Amino acid sequence: MITGPAMAQQSGINYPATKKTDVTDNYHGTSVADPYRWLEDDNSPETKEWVKAQNAVTSAYLDKIPFHGAVRKRLEELWNYPKIGAPFKKGEYYYFFKNDGLQNQAVLYRQRTLNGTPEVFIDPNKFSAAGTVALGNISFSKDAKYLTYQIAKAGSDWQQAFVMDVATKALLKDSIDWIKFSGISWRKDGFYYSRYDKPTEEGRLSKKNEFHKVYYHKLGTTQDQDVLIFEDKDHPLRNAGVQVTEDERFLILHQTEGTSGRQLFYWDLEDPSQKAFNLLVKGFEYEPDVIDNNGDKLLLKTNEGAPNYKVELVDPKNPSSRKVIIPEQKEVLQSVGTAGKRLFASYLKDAASRVAQYTYDGKLDRQIDLPGIGTAGGFGGEDTDKEFFYTYTSFVSPATIYKYDIASGKSTLFARTEVKFRQEDYETKQVFFNSKDGTRVPIFLSYKKGIKKDGTNPVLLYGYGGFNIPMTPAFSVSNLFFMEQGGIYAVVCLRGGSEYGEAWHKAGMMDRKQNVFDDFIGAAEFLVKDKYTSPSKLAIRGGSNGGLLVGACMTQRPDLFKVALPAVGVMDMLRFQNFTIGWAWVTEYGSSVKPEQFNYLVKYSPLHNLKAGTQYPATLVTTADHDDRVVPAHSFKFAATLQAANAGTNPTLIRIETQAGHGAGKPTSKLIEEAADVWSFTMYNLGMSFK
């Protein structure tokens, strides 16, 4: 057993000197200082030196933790197991992703039969020696003769697309650059995609993204010959994308002004009289999605008049003519997949999956029996499919793959993931508490069996609370490690997500964002009151919007938490809209440009609520140099301000990953390194021992 030292020894860190400059903004008569504005320039030599100096201090601190190496070794052991994705059929082959264990990127395989010999189809590990180039979206042509695949370098949102001949695995000359926030939609001998204009090298990772355009690329041509299908010159801050119905009859154009609300257009390509897109659903109040077409009608999932969503049949030539196919239910409808000319409606009941199978005219075939209370996904395929594969997982159950027969509704175990732990030693239970305003909020608690409610358990409380994203059960060897060490992994389903429909989402956005923080603080208070833990044993973690959550809660209640782990967080709520895709979050947060919205943003903005002379929790801020989603300047400025403000002996460090982005596509080696650093820091500051 390796034991950490007393927490009194946390002091004495020599933080890098961070210069302050005289920068002040006037927001509607209120002056707001921004002394670390210079850190927003990710290209400046000064910023790069600051990053280097901060990383050196953080590395030195972590290296002194006596069990740091042991943590990394155990994480590597846990991580080293085969990870297999659900197979899917395209043309003559079944395709599936597999990571043998510690490969940096999962490999795409194919085989002619389910029992056949697999062959490597695409190996992203060969894209770069360090594994920092990741495979993004893949899309097959309807006849499965061609495949487009996208790659992302160093975690950036910018992607490049290539075209492959499926039979020979040879690359065609076709290559598409500067794709962002877009998949590929094939039609006949080409495909649709969305992109921005080529950025300058200096502004590539931070400049505001404007004027999203949709193009059609014909095989065998160069990108400069691509046909512009749609642009909106009057609205530079709108994004657009095209999907093609499976029978290739309809083009559906979806346009967004942010992360909430959507406007839909359609183009019936079998109607010779239609020469352009026509409006289907006027935006941007609701969240409509076209599922598929049924002949000349369209199946639409929408929350218009139904906060928990419903499915309607719409006549595109008369969009107001709608027939309810699947009515709104008590549980929230998350998604609708199609396969074998059936609809698969996935619902959430208290954040756990429920799936029902319907005909295209809305007749219920059956409720699908799932293995337990967890998360099931992958309910979809092609019109001609008679079967498909789906996955099931929970906090203590690795992903299990089932083969589903559409006609009978029978699920058959296809593949079980084998991880080096005794699953029967762990359990998850769901508890509920009442938040500050009386709202009932669920928490999932996962731990090794035998814990005692005596207030001494280390707890990692995780949350997100925004953008209509639900927190549902999912397996993670990293979180398993913390449970193995005696910790309780707690996930709270905050308002702002979609666990209970659009009303739940709206209750945690804009001027109601404080509800999210109240829920998270309420969850922590509940866990303390119910003697699961105590403030000296409580760590909080969240990423992106969840990083904002951690930043806001540690500034509002620094006394309640011992450790804070804000990752790639939105920390400057007054300037977030000025960078890359930040403008799209205005529909979720509001904007400091508007006086009434500035008034509530400034009250919780993590950067602006750090107060000098306050004892803050032990904090490890994490970000990455190629994060062009939430630019690292958020974390840079927050860390600099925190280090200047903190009055206690708790460490306030920042870890800045190089050649990495917001998180997607991060190689296994970097995931393990980061997990080792984060868990070592957490355990050390919670006074835990390595077992």
Image: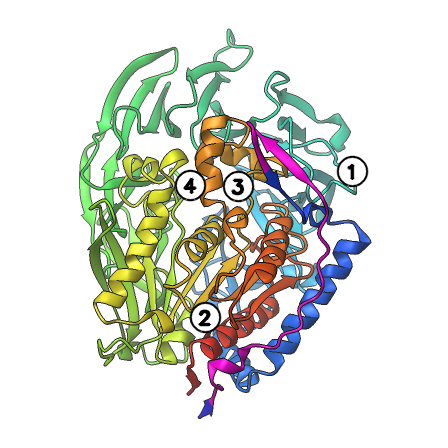
Q: Earlier in the sequence, mark 2 or mark 4?
A: 4
Q: Quadrant of the C terminus?
A: bottom left
Q: Quadrant of the N terminus?
A: bottom left
Distance CA(mark 2)–CA(mark 1) = 38 Å
At horizontal 23% and vertical 27% (from top left) the residue drawn is 325
- Which mark lies nearer to you, 2 or 3? 3
At horizontal 61% and vertical 16% (from top left) the residue drawn is 234
Distance CA(mark 2)–CA(mark 3) = 30 Å
Q: Which residues are magenta?
A: 3-31
Look at the numbered disc 3 and give the secondary structure of its residue: loop
Callout 2–callout 1 Cβ contact below 8 Å? no
Residue 424 horizontal side relative to residue 604, left or right: left
Callout 2–callout 3 Cβ contact below 8 Å? no
Amino acid at circle 1:
Thr
| Mark 4 Cα-neighbour bin, 10 Å: few <14, some 14–19, many ≥20 | many
Disc on res. 573? 3
Callout 2–callout 4 Cβ contact below 8 Å? no
- Is residue 472 visible in the rendered structure shown here? no
Residue 275 horizontal side relative to residue 390, left or right: right
Amino acid at circle 4:
Phe
- Which mark lies nearer to you, 3 or 4? 3
In the picture, residue 469 is in which quadrant?
A: top left
Distance CA(mark 3)–CA(mark 4) = 15 Å
Q: Earlier in the sequence, mark 3 or mark 4?
A: 4
Q: Earlier in the sequence, mark 3 or mark 1?
A: 1
Q: Earlier in the sequence, mark 2 or mark 3?
A: 2
At horizontal 43% and vertical 20% (from top left) the residue drawn is 283
Place of residue 71 in the rendered image (x, y in percent of width and height, measured from the top left): 51, 81
Amino acid at circle 2:
Ser
Distance CA(mark 1)–CA(mark 4) = 30 Å
Q: Main secondary structure of the magenta part?
A: loop
Disc on res. 478? 2
